[in-house]
Structures are given as C-alpha cells and as structure tokens.
Amino acid sequence: MRATNIPGPSGHPPPPFLIVTPYYTRCLQLLLKDDTAKFRSEMQGQMVEYLARGDRHLLIVLPTGGGKTMAMALPSFIEPDGITLVVVPFVALMEDLKKRLTHWNIPWGMFGQKDADTKRVIFVSIEVAARPEFTQYSRNLGTSGLLRRIILDEAHHFLMSSHFRPAFIYLVNLIAAGCSIGFLTGSMPPEYEDELWSALGIPRHLTITLRAPSTARPEISYRFTKVDADDLEEKVVEYVNSVTLREEERGIVFCNTKAKARQMAEALGVKAYTSELKLHEKKEIMRDWLDGTHCWLVGTPAIGSGLDHAHVRYVVHVEPSYTLIDYTQETGRAGRDGKPSVAQTFHSGPPLGSADDATRFGGYEEMAAMVKAVDSCPRFHMTRFLDGKGANCPATPGAEFCGNCQKRLVRHLFFVC
C-alpha cells in the first residue's frame, strides 16, 4: 500500500491506495460462475478486500447500482467459516438481498431462527438490531470467534430518517462486538462523515472511507417541468401515455403521499404500492409489474429502497422528493443496465416539509434550491451536495444531458450556426 496526504472532499486524508489482489477477482469469477467477470470498479474491489481484512471500520459510498451487495456476498463466499451480520432498514431491500444470496448459493438466515448460527449471513431489521438481545448475541458471536463483520445497509437512513435515528443510537452497542463494521450507502455527503463516526464514538484513525469520485449517474437525464397544481395529474398521465417502453423495460411513478399515489394509480389503471398494504398485496403489485402485466409501478417512496430492476427506463415524480437524498435514491432506480434513462419531475412548487429534524441531513434545503433554480443543471446541485464538488452535465464524462443543459446546447449551436 502507498499513502497520500492530499485531503479528500471531507477535509480528511483519503484512504491508503489499495491495489486489489488477483485472488479477489478470481473469487468473484467463481461466485458469478463467469471466468471473465471483473469488479465494476476498482473501488468495489477495494471494498471487498478491506472488509475481508477486517482491521478497520469502513464507510462505502458508491452510486446506486455500484455493486455494494458484494460487501456481504463475496467475503462470506470466500471464508471457510464465520458469520456476517447484516442490518437492513427496509423489508423490500432485505427480500432483494435474500434473493441475491440464494442465487449465489450463500446460506443466509434471520436473527432468531434456531439454525441461524449455521448460516454465513444473518439478516436483522434495524429495529431488532437496537434491542439488548441482539447486542448480546453479537457480543457472544464475537467472543466465540465466529463473527467476521457487521454490515449496515443504506446507512444514510440512520442519520436522516426520523424513524430510524432512535434505533441508530443503540447501534453504538454493536462496537463492543469487537469486529469491523461496514456502512453501505449511495448517498452520504462528505460533510456528514464526522457526524457519523462521532455518533458511534469511533475514532477517525480506526476508519476508512471509500468514496467514489462521483456518485452521479451519467446514464440518467434529469428533467423538471413546472405545471399548475390543478393540471398536475393530467400532465403526468399524458406523459406516461406518451412513453414507449420495450418489452423488458419498466417505468415508476413516485408520489409523496398515499392519497396522491392512489389517485395517480387509479388514473393510470393500476394499483398503488403504499406502506400500509399487506405483504401479499405488495407482492402481487410487484409481481404484476415485474412480469409485464403492468409496465408502470405507482406508489410512495416505500417502493424505493430494495427495488433493483435492471431495465427501469423512466422514473417520474409527482411533485419533488422531500430531500435531495430521497431524490437521488428514487431516481437511482433508473438505468441500472447502463442505458440512457429519464428522471422526469412534474412540480407545482417546492418540496413539502421543512428544514427541521432529520430532513436537514437529507438535503431538504438543497432539494428546494434545485427546484427553484429553474435554469440550472440538476446534476450540478446533486454532485455539489453528495460529492462535495459540483459537476454539470458537460463536465461529467458520458453524461446524458439534463433538460436545461440540452436547452443551453441547442441555443449555443443555434448561435454558432
């Protein structure tokens, strides 16, 4: 390894540069049963090797679709024994992770099951992870030498969500388990790193942050259209009906409230996916969407995390997301196959809510500013907040231009001609 003292975006030195050994690439090929497989990025390989070493706590910030699931999958596949505990904030996300591990033949279980200790990966919800019995369980695993690591998925929610913050306080107890903890997220602004480690009581010298140079998704074109509130439903329906999707492609419509989701779903001839539905109802809606019975999925942000369909081509927002992190996560469902995709927002004004409580961590004010700046580049606002430095579409290699950058390009070409 070789180190550098050039400060990172958060003002702290970047992690030591790690050249991923061929061993881990070969293990990836064996896991995927593909002799040509490679890590999606150098940073994904570094993530796996650091977690396999287990000598420091790790914050991993990779864009949505960047392959963070390998943090729990590949080390567990490599090791002859031992357990990885995975704390997950959402049921939908947990179900998706279970399917992936099953596909890769990695034994997994749920905390509380009688045979859980025979599995390689044990899942637990954030609420259960905050209970004393789980703390004691993790300590016992650590004492026995079975515990290899603890993974906290979608870690930004532990800071920004008013629902999860109380439970997050109790996660400090997991430090006593005596193993490395990996925090996975696609949306953790550099300025919040210190707050994360401070809240957990972890000294900086015991941590490493792996942060992608940019969490921007170049394949997504971000577009905002202001409309009168009375015309909102009509404009969204008109837009959705104008879109042509290939057989494998899908679209998602996000609404901020259950009432609006039900209203939009009725207008589009589908059922709304909302948090109060029973599990079998959610599964039915999702199944109809996945198999193409309905190509559009309409619901609240409850459908956001854990949804990983490769060919989502359009993400439509009915009014802006509450925060910029919400918006990044929700639009990040699009274009996971790397093909050009569109994130279209129809809005009648700024996002609902306020800059109080946990929305500060999520970037409420930044989201409001982006919506208000009608002629600026959304990608610039997103990268300035999430990466610590702004980059518009022309400055982002291979980026699909947003609506405003497209307009500026057309004006420039018209002037030149």
Image (spheres, rainbow, N blue to C red):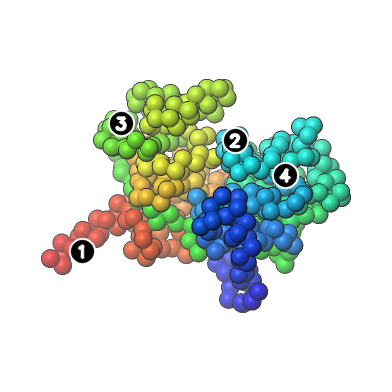
Element on which disc 4 rests: loop
Mark 4 or mark 3, whichever is nearer to me: 4
Question: Where does label 1 land, which residue?
Answer: 412
Q: Along the horizontal axis of the image, is 172 left or right of 337?
A: right
Element type where label 1 sits in the image: helix
Q: Residues within 10 Å of mark 3 (few under 14, many from 20)?
A: some
Residue 386 visible in image: no
The residue that appears at 42% across and 48% down in the rendered structure is 337
Which mark sits nearer the N-terminus, 2 or 3? 2
Does residue 261 sit above or below 10 in this rendering? above
How much space separates mark 1 and mark 2, taking CA atoms? 48 Å
Q: Earlier in the sequence, mark 1 or mark 2?
A: 2
Give the residue number, with chain letter if any, for mark 4: 120
Give the residue type at disc 2.
Glu
Identify which residue, 355 or 262, lies in the foreground: 262
**Contact? badges 2 and 4 (CB < 8 Å):** no
Asked if the residue at tag 3 contacts the one at tag 4, i.e. Cβ–Cβ closer than 8 Å, the answer is no
Q: CA distance from mark 3 to mark 1?
A: 33 Å
* Circle 4 residues within 10 Å: few <14, some 14–19, many ≥20: many
